[in-house]
């Protein structure tokens, strides 16, 4: 444990509660080794980023090799081989997994999930700005979003995400959006009707942004590929851009490389970050259709895409991403995920009739279940931190979202480690609800 005089200000942490902050020295596979000699099973992939496992040898070798060669390079007007390799790799993967007569053709690099979503929003607004100038119409600015969604913690991404305690202090600065219901079972038609109405509104929307198939931070809410497809079709019919925030869902998390491929949907813009480097180092990419790129193409510098961050396409991060893509191209990752999924399914099925739990659900390498609690058990209820501490005492890194307990492990986790996690979830059920 760290001592109380640490100057570190942690994210999503109330330092006034003096909760334990384990210091981790080393990690491998699904295990974290702490300074006090204890080990933890990383049941949430270190906040949804680690895919193949911590310190994957192929990825760390690529990082080491690249660090000796070229570390960081200005990316305006310069390029390097790792970035070229990742961009070609991403386009190759989207060609195969998200095929379309009008395919994704261009990759814009950035360094976090929030940033690649900001980039997607700016690309969409830039597209309509340039199109309005060319065609003499009015530019579109309105973004349609899904209730309960999460797209990041910057001002722009908070604006397109759910409003709540997380962003109340910043509410006056968040821009106005049109929210449609999440198409969970029973709300399908309400979602489609609201989307249709938003697309037909007098103020024409620029884009719809969604988390495909799974709303992560919203509480591991799942909806069907058919609904994803139906939403994309409505957008296409109304010439509204369809942005898929695959920051959490891509790289196999939902069982397929991209979640959108389960719906046969090719978005106009795809955002990817977290697992892009296998979760080892930060890198993000926003992948766009040709028409989005072409809208910014002219002989006039004023039309260029005005976005950059210092570490855009950092060479070491790109080398890690290239190694991740090579893993996907040479190893049978989907079979690994399917086996993990089956194991989690068997264990979550056992909880189906547990009196403490409800709504067991799983997609790919994500399993979730809700602890039955009274009304008002939102994110800030004591349930989540109490559970977190309960799991920590048992050597498990789990971080429930309110009363939703979920497991999202690295794909290399062993059956025995999965069992330890679910044994503890069963035990927690007995403890909390008798
Ligand atoms: C985590 C997440 C983000 C934000 O990514 P950061 O790298 O934390 O900025 C955006 N969208 C979704 C769906 C996410 O899960």
Image (cartoon, grey):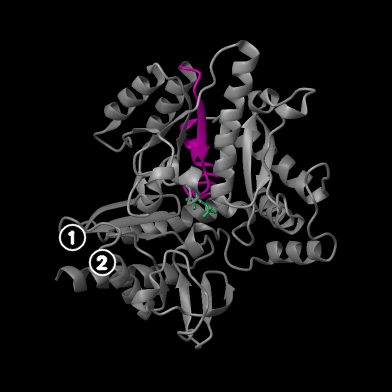
Residue at 45 percent of width and 63 percent of height: 44
Q: Is residue 272 left or right of residue 105?
A: left
- Graded by Cα atoms within 10 Å as few (under 14), some (14 to 19) or many (20 or more), the crowding at tag 2 reads some
Vertical relation: 112 (above or below) 3: above
Q: Residue furthest right?
A: 69
Q: Is residue 406 left or right of residue 27?
A: left
The Cα–Cα distance between marks 2 and 1, rounded to whole angstroms, is: 9 Å
Q: Quadrant of residue 227?
A: top left
- On the picture, is 285 further left or further right than 36? right
Pinpoint residue 143: horizontal percent, then vertical percent: 45, 31
Where residue 144 is drawn, which disc sits there?
Answer: none
Closer to the chain start, of discs 2 and 1, is 1
Seen at 68% across and 38% down, the residue is 107
Q: Nearer the viewer, residue 283 or 319?
A: 283
Q: Which residue is mark 2?
A: 383
Q: Which residue is mark 1?
A: 373
* 81 up-or-down from 179: above or below: below
Q: Is residue 417 above or below residue 162?
A: below
The quadrant in which residue 233 appears is: top left
Q: Position of residue 275 (x, y in %)?
A: 58, 54
Camera-nearest residue between 38 and 22: 22
Residue 405 on the magenta span: no
Decide which of 336, 256 is in the foreground and name it.
256
Magenta segment boundaries in residue numbering: 238-264
- Where does the C terminus fall, quadrant-wise? bottom left
Residues at discs 2 and 1 in contact (Cβ within 8 Å): yes
Q: Residue at left 61%, top 18%?
A: 131
């Amino acid at each position: 444990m760290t001592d109380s005089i640490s100057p570190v200000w942690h994210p999503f942490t109330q330092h006034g509660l003096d909760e334990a902050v384990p210091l981790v020295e080393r990690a491998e596979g699904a295990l974290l080794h702490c300074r006090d000699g204890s080990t933890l099973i990383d049941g949430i992939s270190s906040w949804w980023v680690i895919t193949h496992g911590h310190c994957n040898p192929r990825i760390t070798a690529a990082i080491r090799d690249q660090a000796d060669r070229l570390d960081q390079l200005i990316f305006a007007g310069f390029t390097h081989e790792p970035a070229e390799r990742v961009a070609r790799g991403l386009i190759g993967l989207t060609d195969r997994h998200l095929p379309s007569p009008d395919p994704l053709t261009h990759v814009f690099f950035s360094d976090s999930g929030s940033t690649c979503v900001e980039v997607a929003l700016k690309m969409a607004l830039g597209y309509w700005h340039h199109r309005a100038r060319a065609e003499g119409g009015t530019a579109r600015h309105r973004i349609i979003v899904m209730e309960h969604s999460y797209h990041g913690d910057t001002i722009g991404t908070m604006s397109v995400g759910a409003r709540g305690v997380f962003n109340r202090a910043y509410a006056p600065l968040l821009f106005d959006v049109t929210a449609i219901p999440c198409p969970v079972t029973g709300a399908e038609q309400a979602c489609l009707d609201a989307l249709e109405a938003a697309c037909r509104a007098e103020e024409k929307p620029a884009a719809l942004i969604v988390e495909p198939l799974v709303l992560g931070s919203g509480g591991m809410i799942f909806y069907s590929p058919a609904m994803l497809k139906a939403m994309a079709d409505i957008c296409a019919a109304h010439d509204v851009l369809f942005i898929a925030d695959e920051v959490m869902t891509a790289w196999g998390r939902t069982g397929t490389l991209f979640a959108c491929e389960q719906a046969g949907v090719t978005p106009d813009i795809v955002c990817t970050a977290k697992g892009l480097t296998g979760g080892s180092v930060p890198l993000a990419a926003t992948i766009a259709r040709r028409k989005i790129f072409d809208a910014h193409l002219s002989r006039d510098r004023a039309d260029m895409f005005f976005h950059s961050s210092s570490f855009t396409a950092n060479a070491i991060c790109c080398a890690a991403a290239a190694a991740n893509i090579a893993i996907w191209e040479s190893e049978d990752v989907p079979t690994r995920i399917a086996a993990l999924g089956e194991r989690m399914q068997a264990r979550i099925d056992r909880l189906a009739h547990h009196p403490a739990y409800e709504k067991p659900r799983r997609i790919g390498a994500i399993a979730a279940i809700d602890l039955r609690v009274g009304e008002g058990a939102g994110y800030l209820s004591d349930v989540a931190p109490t559970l977190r501490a309960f799991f920590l005492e048992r050597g498990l890194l789990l971080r429930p979202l309110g009363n939703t307990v979920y497991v999202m492990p690295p794909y290399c986790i062993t059956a025995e480690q999965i069992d330890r996690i679910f044994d503890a979830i069963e035990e927690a059920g007995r403890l909390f609800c008798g």
